[in-house]
Amino acid sequence: MNKYEAEFSNLVRAYRKRHMGKGPSQIQTTFCKNWAICEMQGNLSPVEKFIAGYDEGKQMLRSARTEMVKDMYQKNHPVEMEELLGANFLELFVDIDIEKDKGMSIFVFDQQLEDKFSKES
């Protein structure tokens, strides 16, 4: 992970902590084409882990951690991420495995990130 990918990971963690109360404990970011792909572990809070102990809770959490997170980024534009990358945020794809507490977010930008930052370290 180069320094821009590492800094992007830090911005994702801070953003989620600010807007959700908790950020992932580990984030690995990779730039590919115009995507910033974030693999995340340790997403769930203790209360969410308790809720995940019930089948209905798992579905509710998965919905909250996908659709609501995408909505959060639309309502609270990730300006710091755009400033770091010099690119405009377009959309976000999100999925999470509640049982494994692993998630994936793919941030889509209007510029090639891989080419722009591949020579940076």
Image (cartoon, rainbow, N blue to C red):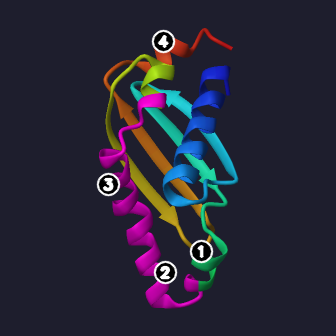
At label 3, the amino acid type is Asp
Q: Which residues are magenta?
A: 51-80
Horizontally, residue 61 falls left or right of residue 26, namely left
To which residue does mark 2 refer? 58
Q: Position of residue 65 (x, y in %)?
A: 45, 64
Q: Earlier in the sequence, mark 4 or mark 1?
A: 1
In whole angstroms, how far apart are the C-alphas of marks 2 and 4? Answer: 39 Å
In whole angstroms, how far apart are the C-alphas of marks 4 and 1? Answer: 36 Å
Circle 2/circle 1 CB separation < 8 Å:
yes
In whole angstroms, how far apart are the C-alphas of marks 4 and 3? Answer: 28 Å
In whole angstroms, how far apart are the C-alphas of marks 2 and 1? Answer: 8 Å
**Marker disc for residue 116:** 4
Q: Earlier in the sequence, mark 1 or mark 3?
A: 3
To which residue does mark 3 refer? 71
To which residue does mark 1 refer? 99
Front in this rendered view, residue 44 or 119? 44
Identify the residue at horizontal 41%, vertical 38% (top origin): 107
Asked if residue 67 lies in the magenta stretch, the reply is yes
Identify the residue at horizontal 60%, vertical 67% (top origin): 44
At label 4, the amino acid type is Lys
Which is in the foreground here, disc 1 or disc 3? 3
Q: Position of residue 14 (x, y in %)?
A: 59, 44
The quadrant of the rendering that contains the C terminus is top right
